[in-house]
């Protein structure tokens, strides 16, 4: 017997949840439950919810940036305000949107997929969430508290990678940079604690029979993400400690006049910064690796190769950081090394794309919402990967570093790659989390508006970048040939916004009015679909046992189970 | 993979051990950056004092810290054997040795700051020295707090046998702090003094 759900036999009796104070359903009671909870599912949803709220805020900042760049010599935003907006947009999108959303998916799904009742350390999990949330609030509080003693500065305006010497006392007066520093320090602690929790859960809490070779790919990829986080985030923490020492105790880490080195900041930051890109995109791969097989009605193609490619990406990603620094003036040897190591990453990434295509090939493809977003992801991530290989060529980057070409490249990675799979994941697991089906019509409107808007926004930026437009300029002169590309870009944003609006409406509408989903609406194969929707507090009445990679397939097809072939 | 039968002895690694191993890995990454910064700035100070002028090899402190790794293992053994007195003696000795190390470092810093005039903003040697040694010392302090909590629990007879693994984790952390000191000692007190 592979898996058994809701049978009479239970492992032990679960105590009824304590009734504390207020009536159920009242606002105070709901807040109380959210604050006190250590349940991985609630925390997961809170992570994703908080991430989506920060996403809207940071997205509005991007909208303002695009509005400013609509005309040459526009005066919609002051230069100082513009600098704060792109800094807050970048910082928030990476640390307050990307990180919580990927950890939200991990929190919600990993224990369910490995047949566990919760994360390994539930209280550490709650600690991670609240530390993250307050790190975000701290960052945004800079708008109110930023003027500081010198009444200089409000929100941070040093860019999301805060190159030295911009952050020194001389050039960054007041406390705005300190908000950035402390917020990232806190966020780093939150990420590390959640990542350790994730690794321990995966290593030590798998249900009976779930060997490493039978874990869903989603879980495998998150295991790798966990290790990347605990190796790559400490350098960021070290950076922030050094920066604080520089700013408040007069240390000279990045102070070139006192013998320090501004380039060292770049090295240390990107030792964190590049693996961070893979920390963000591997969860996207994880979601695609679950959605594509289910909607192609075939098991994933090349499971062991997918695992190997993931580990190889993670390994290589630790040795490519200086491709962000080709224009700094490294030795030829340094340039060559980092160019080659960067290009090497295209190999495992290419393997993955071919394996997803191999999964779809000959499958009975069902074009449901999650699958559509995954197909969009495949196309867009391919473009992102191709511009990535182009940018790995050092002499090419000498021309295009810090241009809009780079902006276009990483927005294709993070929106076309990560955000599309996040949408796919939300539509795919929405029925599990809330027991209701997302509305397909609203979802299609979201998909098409957002896809058209996304390409219209970012494809022209390749061109304006090639035409020499630098990133982070608050305005530009007329007659350089940049106007039309910037205008197309801004119009694209106006199409993306209703797309996001339909997404939000869909989430709310389906919660109240959606069709009941049942336990397994997509006819899927992993363990989270074996329990009820939404799952009970304890996830599984009886902990499951598995014999293959697709335990639910075994259960549904006892005549032809997978474990006969694996 | 064959059709491996599910057996009753489905055993996975202890979550505490995996968790602490991850913590050690992530802390090592943090220390690596500070060690790299120290090595990178070696010999790049624009003005003195330089390491070869002011640093003395910390014999006593190092012997105390390395010795405490031995005493903590002895304490653990007595605990597992159920020998309470032996446990308390060895564990107390560990705390004393760790505290001596902190005292020794404080003394060294006092000497450097007030006699030699080396502070964190004197030069890049001061910057990297105080941040690296200070980061290590702060870990020793955290270790001492953990050891003391265990010691107090031991005095009050509050260590049931199913908590022995918790105690083992404290000693793992203590060994890690010790191992980091080997790196710091080599880099700061040997390499940078011999080969400035």
Image (cartoon, coloured by chain):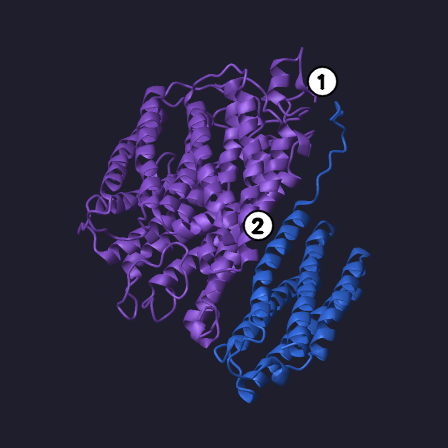
Chain colours: A purple, B blue
Q: Position of residue A130 (x, y in %)?
A: 44, 49
Residue drawn at (26%, 43%) of the image: A63
Residue lying farthest to the top in this orientation: A559
Query: Which chain is disc 2 placed on?
Result: A
- Disc 2 versus disc 1: nearer the observer: 2
Give the vertical position of A334 relative to A170 (above or below): above
Q: Mark 2 points at which residue?
A: A318
Give the structural element (helix, strand or loop) at label 1: helix
Q: Which residue lies furthest to the bottom in this view?
A: B115
Label 1, residues with CA under 10 Å away: few <14, some 14-19, many ≥20? few
Disc 2 residue crowd, few under 14, some 14–19, many 20+, Cα 10 Å: many
From the viewer's perspective, is residue A33 above or below residue A300? below
Front residue of B137 and A24: B137
**Vertical arrangement, residue A190 with respect to residue A483, above or below:** below
User: Which quadrant: the C terminus of chain A?
Assistant: top right
Marker count (numbered): 2
Instruction: Depth check: give the residue in front, B66 or A247.
Output: A247
Is residue A16 visible from the viewing direction of this image? no
Q: Residue at x 25, y 58 (%)?
A: A80
Where disc 2 sits, the SS reads loop
Residue A564 badge: 1
Q: Are marks 2 and 1 on the same chain?
A: yes
Which quadrant holds residue B156?
A: bottom right
Chain ID at mark 1: A
Q: Can residue B17 be seen in this view?
A: yes
Identify which residue is drawn at 76% across, 30% down: B8
Task: Give A209 or A12, whichever is nearer the viewer.
Answer: A209
x, y percent for residue B46 = 51, 80
Relative to A186, A234 lies left or right: right
Residue drawn at (76%, 28%) of the image: B7
């Amino acid at each position: 017997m592979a898996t058994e759900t809701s049978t009479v036999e239970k492992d032990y009796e679960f105590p009824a949840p304590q009734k504390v104070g207020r009536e159920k359903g009242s606002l105070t009671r709901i807040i109380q439950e959210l604050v006190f909870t250590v349940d991985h599912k609630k925390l997961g949803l809170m992570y994703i919810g908080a991430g989506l709220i920060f996403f809207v805020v940071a997205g509005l900042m991007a909208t303002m940036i695009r509005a400013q760049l609509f005309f040459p010599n526009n005066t919609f935003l002051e230069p100082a305000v513009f600098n704060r907006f792109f800094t807050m947009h970048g910082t928030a999108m990476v640390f307050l949107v990307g990180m919580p959303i990927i950890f939200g998916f991990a929190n919600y799904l990993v224990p369910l997929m490995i047949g566990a009742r919760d994360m390994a350390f539930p209280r550490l999990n709650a600690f991670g969430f609240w530390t993250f949330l307050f790190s975000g609030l701290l960052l945004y509080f800079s708008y109110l508290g930023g003027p500081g003693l010198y009444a200089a500065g409000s929100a941070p305006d040093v860019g999301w990678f805060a190159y030295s010497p911009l952050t020194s006392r001389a050039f960054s007066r007041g406390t705005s940079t300190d908000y950035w520093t402390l917020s990232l320090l806190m966020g780093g602690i939150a990420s590390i604690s959640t990542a350790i929790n994730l690794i321990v859960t995966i290593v030590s809490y798998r249900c009976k029979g779930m060997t490493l070779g039978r874990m869903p790919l989603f879980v495998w990829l998150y295991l790798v993400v966990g290790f990347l986080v605990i190796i790559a985030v400490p350098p960021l923490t070290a950076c922030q400690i050094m920066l604080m020492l520089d700013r408040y105790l007069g240390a000279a880490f990045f102070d070139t006049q006192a013998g320090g080195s501004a380039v060292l900041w770049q090295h240390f930051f990107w030792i964190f910064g590049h693996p961070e890109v893979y920390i963000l995109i591997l969860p996207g791969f994880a979601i695609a690796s679950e959605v594509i097989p289910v909607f192609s009605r075939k098991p994933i193609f090349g499971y062991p190769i997918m695992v190997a490619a993931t580990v190889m990406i993670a390994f290589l990603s630790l040795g490519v950081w200086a491709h962000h620094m080709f224009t700094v003036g490294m030795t030829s040897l340094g340039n060559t090394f980092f160019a080659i190591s960067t290009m090497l990453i295209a190999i495992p990434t290419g393997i993955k794309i071919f394996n997803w295509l191999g999964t779809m090939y000959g499958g009975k493809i069902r074009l449901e919402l999650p699958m559509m977003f995954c197909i969009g992801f495949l196309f867009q991530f391919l473009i992102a990967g191709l511009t990535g290989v182009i940018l790995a060529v050092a002499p090419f980057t000498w021309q295009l570093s810090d241009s809009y070409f780079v902006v276009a490249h990483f927005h294709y990675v993070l929106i076309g790659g990560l955000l599309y799979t996040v949408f796919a994941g939300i539509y795919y697991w929405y029925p599990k989390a809330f027991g209701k089906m997302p509305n397909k019509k609203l979802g299609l409107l979201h998909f098409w508006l957002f896809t058209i808007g996304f390409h219209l926004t970012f494809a022209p930026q390749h061109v304006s970048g090639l035409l020499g437009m630098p990133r982070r300029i608050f305005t530009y002169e007329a007659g350089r040939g940049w106007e039309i590309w910037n205008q197309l870009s801004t119009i694209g944003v106006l199409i993306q916004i209703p797309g996001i609006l339909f997404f939000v409406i869909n989430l709310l509408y389906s919660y109240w009015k959606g069709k009941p989903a049942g336990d397994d609406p997509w006819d899927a194969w992993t363990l989270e679909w074996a329990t009820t929707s939404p799952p009970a507090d304890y996830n599984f009445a009886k902990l499951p046992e598995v014999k293959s990679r697709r335990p639910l397939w075994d259960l549904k097809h006892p005549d032809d189970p997978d474990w006969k072939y694996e | 993979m064959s059709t491996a039968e599910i057996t009753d002895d489905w055993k996975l690694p202890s979550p505490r051990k995996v968790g602490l191993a991850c913590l050690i890995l992530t802390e090592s990454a943090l220390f690596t950056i500070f060690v790299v910064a120290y090595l990178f700035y070696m010999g790049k100070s624009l003005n003195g004092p330089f390491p070869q002028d002011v640093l003395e090899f910390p014999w006593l402190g190092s012997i105390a810290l390395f010795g405490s790794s031995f005493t903590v293992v002895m304490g653990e053994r007595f605990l597992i054997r159920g020998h309470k007195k032996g446990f308390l003696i060895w564990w107390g000795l560990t705390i004393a040795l760790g505290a001596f190390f902190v005292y020794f470092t404080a003394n060294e810093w006092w000497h450097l700051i007030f006699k030699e005039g080396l502070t964190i903003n004197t030069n890049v040697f001061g910057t990297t020295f105080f941040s690296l040694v200070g980061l290590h010392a702060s870990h020793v302090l955290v270790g001492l707090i953990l050891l003391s909590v265990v010691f107090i629990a031991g005095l009050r007879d509050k260590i049931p046998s199913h908590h022995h693994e918790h105690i083992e984790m404290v000693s793992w952390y203590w060994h890690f702090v010790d191992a980091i000191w080997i790196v710091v000692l080599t880099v700061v007190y040997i390499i940078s003094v011999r080969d400035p």
